[in-house]
Image (cartoon, helix red, strand yellow):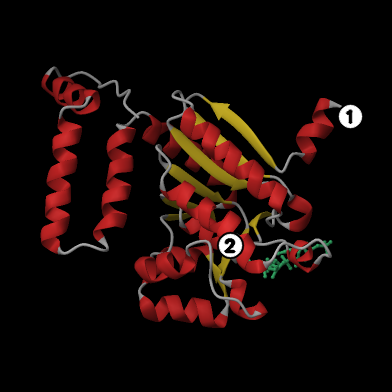
Amino acid sequence: MTHANAAAEAPVLVQDDGAVRTITLNRPQALNSFTVPMHQALRAALAEAAATPSVRCVVLTGAGRGFCAGQDLAEVMGEQAPGVGDLVAEHYKPLALQVSRMPVPVIAAVNGVAAGAGANLALGCDLVIAAESASFIQAFAKIGLVPDCGGTWLLPRLVGRATALGLALTADKLGAAQAKTLGLIWQCVPEADLMPTVQALAARLAAMPVKALVATRLAIDGAQQLSLEGALSEEGRLQSELATAHDCQEGMAAFLAKRAPVFTDR
Ligand code: T3D
């Protein structure tokens, strides 16, 4: 097998551009739907990105015309099929937690349809930028399941209970422009602008104090369970921790010296 063939068949592709690592789901013939090997490859790629100090931002996208169509339904209906509950416990739950705990910002570049767990994988990223031609489908209701991969937690937080239930109960396709209008995603751009827009933003985030960016994600997600007083206390704890770290010292010194800061913490 040639190297090119091996890459074409790998369930995820990994590419670095400076401090930005792009992970591409690579089963375009089935709209990048999840099989166990793709889960394993994606989780390994995320773990490697997390463990590589030179990586300061991760971009997640899909090969071909789709982002990810959720669970590969042929796999679950096959003779060797893993149980549905097992798939969630062994793959979708750890994946959603891994994304939520990445030590660098994660951007979803949604290049096409994102359905079922594929939609919620994208929505669990820090920033979601979608091509105008992309769409989001909470496909679960159509096949007698509930939203997973974090959907029940993410949807009401992103768009409120009424819209979350509307999306989840109808399983209707939501175009990227409408997703932006609803506040489900950060940005909707023309198809040709998707990767240039995402790469420019990723490079910008990579040059920022990523330790503080990640602490911001964790604080905002964590604050959902806290009282105002609890959230204020947590903000104080985080500021104390960050204020003594290199990046905050560097940011303040650079401001006072009227020079560009160089952030290195992760
Ligand atoms: O065990 C568990 O299930 C627990 C975990 C659940 C997590 C989940 O994600 S459940 C939700 C699973 N996903 C779906 O139900 C979505 C199924 N797909 C679709 O509804 C449609 O494909 C789309 C709306 C996403 C896109 O439609 P369209 O018309 O653009 O494309 P298509 O023709 O339907 O699909 C293109 C090919 O991809 C086609 O293969 P073919 O005929 O060209 O050989 C289709 O079968 C394949 N494909 C698309 N989605 C899946 C899939 N194959 C397997 N599994 C899929 N999810």
Indicate the quadrant where residue 158 lies.
bottom left
258 vs 105: above or below? above
Q: Is mark 2 within 8 Å of ligand 1?
A: yes
Return the residue at label 2: 88
Q: Which residue is labeled 1 in the image?
A: 1
Image quarter where ligand 1 lies: bottom right
Q: Residue at x 61, y 67 (%)?
A: 85
The crowd level at tag 2 (other Cα within 10 Å; few <14, some 14-19, many 20+) is: some
Outermost residue to the right: 1
Beta carbon of the mark 1 residue lies under 8 A of ligand 1: no
Disc 1 marks a residue whose amino acid type is Met
- Seen at 78% across and 68% down, the residue is 77
Q: Which mark is residue 208?
A: none
Q: Secondary structure at mark 2?
A: helix
Relative vertical location of residue 41 with respect to residue 248 in this rendering, above or below:
below
Q: Residue at x 48, y 29 (%)?
A: 51
Question: In screen coordinates, is 6 left or right of 214?
Answer: right
Left or right: 26, with 43 as reference point: right
**Label 1 environment density (alpha carbons within 10 Å; few <14, some 14–19, many ≥20):** few
Name the mark nearer the viewer: 1 or 2: 2
Badge 1 marks a residue whose secondary structure is loop
Q: Is residue 102 visible?
A: yes
